């Protein structure tokens, strides 16, 4: 099969970039001819403000590049990951102008929400769900700027009026929870498939002998880092907590590490170091307070055989099976989080059982082979029409 994969990379490497690269490699390893067409958002830095706005709405050069790539490769289909902002949704029109089917992975809620998170002022926000996103512009939801938010809202409105999203033959949501949100917003259910991310190569299970809890992720309000720290303040050093990551709340985390017993901020770590920390952790804490579309860190923990203590919200609650591969706690509730930690500490036999179940969950759902089977099934469905 011949596939063109389109993606706009973020200025700092993130989970979507990793998922894109992993999927390209997955197809190439199995003998498919894959041509990545990539754009890099640092290219925006060379453009003036009005030019940045213009390419966000419709990037003529990206449109041209995609049509040229299609004429050269003659792919069976085009698979789009992220178009925002540099590629723009013009690449969808380019593929359809060449008569090629289009698959699009929904890594976030960008098609529904100006900031792509469905999260505002510390809580879940669905004000624009299924509506024109003028509220997102009014509230300055993108980068806390009304001007920048107006550009994003303009892009979403323009392409809704152009019928751009209807040109996509199949959308891929990462979980059923995310799929239901897009259906709630008016996307046709028959066009929404579900395929999770995966972890490859298999990092192998750890033994969990470190006796600490672990957080891995961006240090930002929607990730629940403040709830995590308040819970550890209540726990009073009963179990060490290692925090891996960086972000806008880094100074708060640094301060908490200096005053709370057992809390250690490790900053950013390479993937190999993260896997080692996961394998030795007693459990991973995933305190997110927004509608995660997936939660890659959770399945990485499963691959290491590490249970997940997850906020009962969004996709991460779906990924974590309460009582089997981890536990749920009420999102934004440090008391409930602390109580669930204490329960795990008081039930070592159950915790050991969860380790086995977490690893079994990875093997059943999140290996490269399982992912490849599901991806090819989606491709075949699209090509059959």
Image: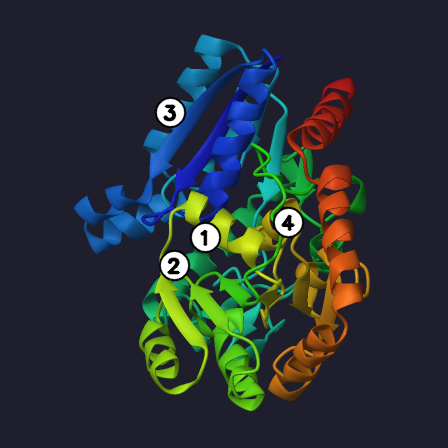
Please report contact status of discs 2 and 1: CB closer than 8 Å, yes or no: yes
Front position among marks 3 and 4: 4
SS for dot 1: helix
Q: Which residue is mark 1?
A: 155
State the residue position of label 2.
151
**Mark 2 packing: few (<14 Cα in 10 Å), some, or many (20+)?**
many
Measured from the top left, where is residue 69 in percent x and y?
43, 17
Q: Are marks 3 and 2 in contact (CB under 8 Å)?
A: no
Foreground: 43 or 186? 43
Label located before the other in sequence (1 or 3)? 3
The disc placed on residue 366 is none
Find residue 299 and name its label: 4
Name the mark nearer the viewer: 4 or 1. 4
The 10 Å Cα crowd at callout 4, few under 14, some 14 to 19, many 20 or more, is many
Give x and y (percent) for residue 129: 64, 65
Mark 2 element type:
helix
Quarter of the view holding residue 192: top right
Mark 4 vs 1, N-terminal side: 1
Q: Position of residue 251 (x, y in %)?
A: 31, 77
Q: Check disc 3 and report the residue beneath it.
A: 64
Q: CA distance from mark 4 to mark 1?
A: 33 Å
Residue at (74% x, 64% y) in the render: 351
| Local SS, label 4 | helix
Q: Residues within 10 Å of mark 3 (few under 14, many from 20)?
A: few
Mark 3–mark 4 contact, CB under 8 Å? no
Are the residues at dot 4 and dot 1 in contact (C-beta closer than 8 Å)?
A: no
Q: CA distance from mark 2 to mark 1?
A: 6 Å
């Amino acid at each position: 099969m011949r596939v063109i994969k389109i993606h706009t990379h973020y200025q700092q490497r993130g989970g979507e970039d990793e998922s894109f690269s992993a999927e390209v490699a997955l197809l190439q390893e199995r003998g498919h001819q894959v041509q990545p067409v990539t754009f890099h958002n640092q290219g925006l830095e060379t453009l003036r403000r009005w030019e940045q706005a213009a390419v966000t709405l419709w990037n003529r050069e990206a449109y041209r590049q995609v049509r040229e790539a299609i004429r050269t490769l003659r792919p069976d289909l085009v698979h789009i990951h992220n178009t925002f902002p540099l590629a723009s949704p013009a690449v969808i029109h380019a593929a359809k102008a060449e008569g090629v089917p289009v698959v699009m992975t929904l890594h976030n809620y960008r098609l529904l929400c100006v900031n792509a998170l469905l999260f505002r002022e510390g809580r879940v926000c669905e004000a624009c769900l299924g509506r024109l996103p003028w509220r997102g512009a009014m509230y300055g939801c993108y980068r806390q700027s009304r001007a920048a938010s107006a550009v994003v809202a303009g892009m979403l409105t323009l392409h809704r009026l152009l019928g751009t999203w209807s040109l996509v033959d199949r959308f891929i949501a990462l979980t059923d929870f995310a799929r239901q949100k897009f259906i709630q917003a008016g996307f046709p259910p028959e066009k929404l498939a579900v395929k999770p991310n995966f972890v490859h190569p298999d990092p192998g299970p750890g033994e969990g002998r470190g006796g600490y809890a672990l957080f891995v992720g961006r240090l930002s309000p929607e990730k629940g880092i403040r709830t995590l720290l308040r819970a550890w303040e209540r726990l009073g050093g009963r179990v060490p907590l290692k925090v891996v990551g960086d972000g806008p709340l880094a100074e708060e985390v640094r301060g908490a590490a200096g005053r709370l017993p057992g809390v250690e901020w490790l900053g950013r770590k390479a993937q190999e170091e993260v896997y080692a920390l996961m394998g030795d952790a007693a459990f991973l804490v995933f305190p997110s307070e927004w509608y995660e579309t997936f939660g890659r860190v959770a399945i990485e923990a499963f691959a290491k055989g590490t249970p997940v203590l997850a906020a009962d919200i969004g996709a991460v609650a779906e990924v974590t099976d309460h009582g089997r591969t981890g536990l749920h706690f009420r999102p934004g509730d440090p008391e409930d989080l602390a109580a669930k930690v204490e329960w795990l500490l008081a039930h070592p036999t159950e915790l050991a059982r969860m380790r086995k179940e977490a690893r079994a969950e990875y093997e059943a759902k999140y290996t490269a082979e399982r992912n490849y089977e599901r991806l090819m099934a989606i491709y075949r469905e699209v090509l059959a029409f």
